[in-house]
Image (cartoon, rainbow, N blue to C red):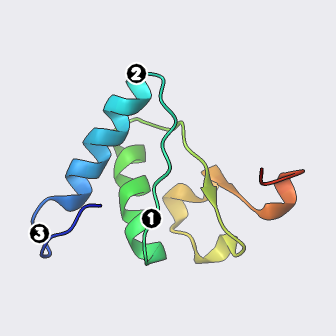
Amino acid sequence: MVLGIPGSGKTKSIVTLVKILAALKKKVLVVSFTNQAIDNVLSRLKASGFDQFVRVTNNVSSVVKDVQSNVKTYQHFETMA
């Protein structure tokens, strides 16, 4: 869990950690209490050239535009197991 006040570098730390773990061929699940926080992390990842992620949602239009090409809805999966 990453906690901190606004501007303390939480998003930057998460982005860096995700990229390191991906380079080590690890699977990463990023979750948050808010969709905005997820979109912030994914937007930063995409802006840094990292595009190997999937954003799962029921409402594609609620996702920020630069991440929408990576969105999947539950209909894209046979099972969530």
Q: Is residue 44 left or right of residue 4?
A: right
Percent of width and height locating residue 31 = 47, 63
Marks 1 and 2, how far apart in space?
A: 23 Å
Amino acid carrying mark 3 in the image? Gly
Of residues 81 and 29, the one drawn nearer to the viewer in this rendering = 81
Q: Is residue 54 left or right of residue 23?
A: right
**At numbered mark 3, what does the secondary structure look like: helix, strand or loop?**
loop
User: Label 3 belongs to which residue?
Assistant: 7
Decide which of tag 3 and tag 2 comes sooner along the chain.
3
Please name the residue shown 43% across and 30% down the image: 22
Please name the residue shown 29% across and 50% down the image: 14
Please name the residue shown 53% across and 56% down the image: 67
Percent of width and height locating residue 79 = 85, 52
Q: Residues within 10 Å of mark 2 (few under 14, many from 20)?
A: few
Q: Of the numbered discs in the image, which one, if any, rests on residue 24? A: 2
Disc 1 and disc 2 in contact, CB within 8 angstroms: no
